[in-house]
Every structure is written in structure tokens, then in C-alpha cells.
Image: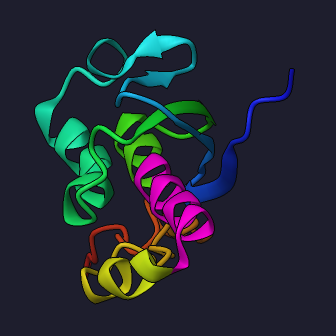
Amino acid sequence: MTVKYYEAVGRRKTASARVRLYPGTGTILVNDRPLEEYFPRSADVIAINRPLQVTDTLNSYNISVHVEGGGLSGQAGATSLGIARALCVADENLRSVLKANGLLARDARAKERKKYGLKRARKAPQYTKR
């Protein structure tokens, strides 16, 4: 028996999330753990649920997420983008709503690399006149 699902990938910083939407009751599993257990901060949970709340599909899909890389905040952003993209695959009519709320834009900001001669990416050593 094959189960129909919709799949998409979301990325943020160095995190990558593979999201699968199954028709169901609204349970979300992240790396085979419940959402609130994997993401203890409520801000991350709100960010992940945002695409579902905007499209009124909070209890329409069971979601399975495999996320790796980065920290919890980056993983939450990657999961949110993955869910939004998977919703577009499931129902093309939701695209305009998601796009209007800025949920389909990939946030390309990442950590800037350290340059030689500097302490961090931009912080220079203290200048001494004598």
C-alpha cells in the first residue's frame, strides 16, 4: 500500500529540512519526535506553525520532518519554509496566500566568514598610535 504525500525541502543558514505532508489530523513529527519536544522554544513552534495557520490547514495534514545541520533557530526556519513549499505542491491555490505573508522567500542570510588580520568577520584589532 502506497501512501500519498507531498514533499519539499526548506533551507535556512546551514540547516536543511526535508518535509512530507500526509493527509491526516495535524500531528507534526520532527526527526521522529513530537514538535514541542524537539523545539522547546515557543517562538520556533509558532514560526513552524505559521504556514499552516495562514492557510487554515492546521488539522488537515500530518507532517513528517527530517532536519539536520545548524542550530535550532535555523532548523525552525528551514522547517517553516519546507512546510510552505509542500503546501504549494499539495494545493497550488495556497501559493498566493503564502507568498503574500512572505513564507515562500528563502532567507539567504548566513554567517559571514572571518577575514585574516581581523578578530572576527569585521572586528579589527585595537589601533595603537604609539
Residue 78 locus on image (x, y percent): 49, 52
| Vertical comparison of 127 with 26: above or below | below
Q: How is the image coloured?
A: rainbow
In the visual, does 94 lie left or right of 3? left
Q: Identify which residue is drawn at 36% across, 28% down.
A: 25
Q: Is residue 50 magenta?
A: no
Q: Which residues are drawn in magenta?
A: 78-92
Q: Identify which residue is drawn at 58% across, 57% down.
A: 10
Which of the two residues, 79 or 5, is positioned nearer the viewer here? 5
Q: Identify which residue is drawn at 37% across, 85% down.
A: 99
Residue 55 locus on image (x, y percent): 28, 65
Residue 13 locus on image (x, y percent): 52, 58
Which of the two residues, 11 or 127, is positioned nearer the viewer here? 11
Which of the two residues, 70 or 20, is positioned nearer the viewer here? 20
Q: How many marks?
A: 0
Residue 69 locus on image (x, y percent): 61, 37
In the visual, does 89 lie left or right of 35? right
Q: Quadrant of the N terminus?
A: top right
| Res. 43 image quadrant | top left
Q: Main secondary structure of the magenta part?
A: helix
Outermost front residue:
1
In the visual, does 118 lie left or right of 6? left
Q: Quadrant of the C terminus?
A: bottom left
| Vertical comparison of 43 with 113: above or below | above
Q: Identify which residue is drawn at 17% across, 44% down.
A: 46
| Vertical comparison of 97 with 114: above or below | below
| Vertical comparison of 19 with 65: above or below | below
| Res. 56 image quadrant | bottom left
In the visual, does 72 lie left or right of 16? left
